[in-house]
Image (cartoon, rainbow, N blue to C red):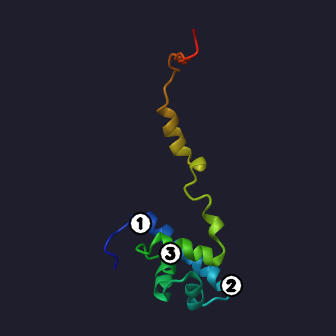
Amino acid sequence: MSIFSIPVAAAEYVAQLGQRIRIARIRRGWSVADLASKAGINRNTLTALELGRPGTAIGVCVTVLWALGLEKSLDSVADPDLDVHGKALEASRRPSRAGKPRKAGNEYDF
């Protein structure tokens, strides 16, 4: 049992990611020990990741994806250019009109 709880939706994503990592490992014909060795982690840690245990460190997840050759799949995770909601919030905080232009201080202006 975990010492902390996460929202159900987040737990489902963690479990799904663990299943995907397990499938990628099996497709490569690697055992848990093989992938754990390639990633430089303990077999129990890899098993926890594959089981979707939320306490598994994100660094472990990224390292395992790297060992599988899947690290590029992280490129779109939390990409600011794909954050439609965040961009909308940012745009709503912009001033509605431009401020008065300031005179540039030119020290050589006589």
Question: Label 3 crowding class (10 Å Cα cut-off): few <14, some 14-19, many 20+?
Answer: some
Question: Outermost residue, top direction?
Answer: 110
Q: Quadrant of the N terminus?
A: bottom left
- The type of residue carrying mark 2 is Arg
Residue at coordinates 58% horizontally, 15% vertically from top-left?
A: 108
Give the residue pinned by disc 3: 60
**Front: mark 3 or 1:** 3
Residue 77, x across and y down, in percent: 57, 59
**Earlier along the polypeptide chain: callout 3 or callout 1?**
1
**Earlier along the polypeptide chain: callout 2 or callout 3?**
2
Q: Nearer the viewer, residue 94 or 12?
A: 94
Disc 1 versus disc 2: distance between alpha carbons? 31 Å
Judge left or right: residue 92 versus residue 72: left
**Earlier along the polypeptide chain: callout 1 or callout 2?**
1
- The type of residue carrying mark 3 is Val
Q: Is residue 25 above or below residue 103?
A: below
Q: Is residue 68 above or below residue 100?
A: below
Q: Is residue 24 above or below residue 58?
A: below
- The type of residue carrying mark 1 is Val
**Front: mark 2 or 3:** 3
User: In the drawing, what numbered circle is on residue 28?
Assistant: 2
